[in-house]
Amino acid sequence: MTLSKKIYDAVKKIPYGKVATYGQIATMCGNPYYARAVGNALHKNPNPEIIPCYRVVNSRGQTAEHFAFGGNEGQEIYLRAEGIEVRNGRVDLNTYQWQNK
């Protein structure tokens, strides 16, 4: 299985109304240092209707300036549609981070 496939499969597991960090997805794929690879794969997301890349934020809960589907504002629209509060480009990870165990 390719790394991109692992990343997309991990992102599909993030529940509605929750977010995960790039590092969290990287760890799920076997290496916490893959965070940059996660960002690259999500930027090339082949099916954003199935792979909810907008649910992935950085380690501080910040949205992606270069979000492939509309920048910060586009990502924030998707997150707010799921009831996730975004303030000043940031999601409260204590409230909205998915606790995958």
Image: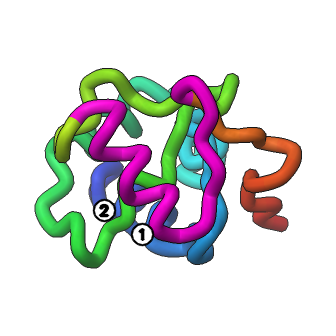
Residue 32 appears anywhere in the view: no
Q: Residue at x 53, y 70 (%)?
A: 82
Q: Position of residue 35 (x, y in %)?
A: 50, 30
> Which quarter of the figure has residue 51?
bottom left
Residue beneath disc 2 = 5
Magenta span contains residue 21:
no
Quadrant of the rendering where the C terminus is positioned: bottom right
Asked if 59 appears above or below 50 in the picture, the reply is above
Q: Position of residue 4 (x, y in %)?
A: 29, 52
Q: Position of residue 9 (x, y in %)?
A: 42, 69
Q: Position of residue 80 (x, y in %)?
A: 51, 58
Asked if 72 appears above or below 13 in the picture, the reply is above
Mark 1 crowd level (few <14, some 14–19, many ≥20, 10 Å Cα): some
The total of numbered circles placed on residues is: 2
Q: Are marks 2 and 1 in contact (CB under 8 Å)?
A: yes
Q: Residue at x 81, y 60 (%)?
A: 99
**Which element is circle 1 on?**
helix
Horizontally, is 36 left or right of 14 in the view?
A: left
| Range shown magenta | 71-89
Magenta span contains residue 72:
yes
Quadrant of the rendering where the N terminus is positioned: bottom left
Q: Residue at x 62, y 69 (%)?
A: 17
Residue beneath disc 1 = 9
> Mark 1 is on which residue type?
Asp
